Image (cartoon, rainbow, N blue to C red):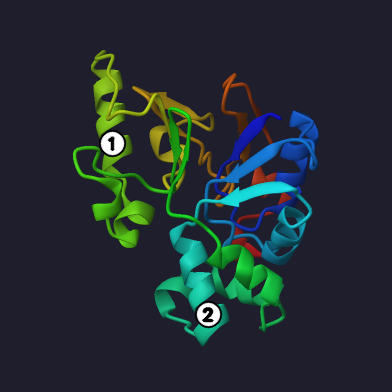
Amino acid sequence: MRTFALGDIHGAYKAMMQCFERSKFDYKKDRLIVMGDVCDGYPEVKQCIDEFLKVKNCDLVIGNHDMWALDWALRGDMPEIWTSQGGDRTMASYNGGPMPKEHIDFLKNGQLWIERDEQIFMHGGFNFDVALKSHSAEALVWDRSLLDMAWKMEIAGRQCQLGKYKDIFIGHTTTELYNTLMPIHACNVWNLDTGVGWSGKLTIMDVDTKEYWQSELSKDLYGGLPNQL
């Protein structure tokens, strides 16, 4: 079994299928860790989750957009902060609702973090000086300070390990903000959100070898940005 981590998808099913094909991902033998933000962005959230349900070993690290989508699916919540950031397209992918129970269960089963040997996977980040269980869910899905700290140390030429984990895998913050469409490796932090939710690419990585594969630019796959479709 190989273990893969898949960056923030944001409804870009076409990009996801390219990543599966290019990495030769095996639905029956390999493990997939989804780094969160499956929802909100391009208009194929339903197709993405349908595909994940075909994977024998699939784990979701829940993201902030997934939490918003789950609030809508369970309680009908539609705050403007969500609908204006892709929530309207998540609802449209389900023809306005309801979301199927198996899709709700997929999101409800999402974890705030996953530990694997000396690796940890989470959507946003954490304070490595504080016990994980002491963090709020909001902190773990929204944090950007861990990546910012690692990046500043990296460009300063400081080789370091933040916390006890050999590898920390995150998403949430598009690498486009750092002027690259490749995964960022800074200290022991790996950021796999390479901007597919905007105009960038989706990335899937073998977390043992660190080999990765990417989709084409999402704006080319869909003929525009999410808010233009």
| Residue placed most toward the observer, 147 or 32 | 32
| Residue placed most toward the observer, 94 or 226 | 94
- The percent position of residue 194, horizontal first and vertical second, equals 53, 39
- The percent position of residue 224, horizontal first and vertical second, equals 66, 54
- Name which quarter of the figure residue 167 lies in: top left
- The percent position of residue 9, horizontal first and vertical second, equals 60, 51
Q: Hey, which residue is sitting farthest left in the picture? A: 129
169 lies left or right of 127: right
Locate the N terminus by quadrant: top right
What residue appears at the point 34 percent right and 52 percent down from the top-left corner?
140
> Can see residue 216?
no
The answer to which of marks 1 and 2 sits earlier in the sequence is: 2
Q: Mark 2 = which residue?
A: 72
Indicate the secondary structure of the residue bearing disc 1.
Answer: helix
Above or below 198: residue 216: above
Above or below 180: residue 195: below
> Can see residue 120?
yes
| Residue placed most toward the observer, 200 or 214 | 214
132 lies left or right of 110: left
Marking on residue 148? 1
Indicate the secondary structure of the residue bearing disc 2.
Answer: helix
Q: Which amino acid does label 1 sit on?
A: Asp
- Between the residue at mark 1 and the residue at mark 2, the CA separation in whole angstroms equals 31 Å
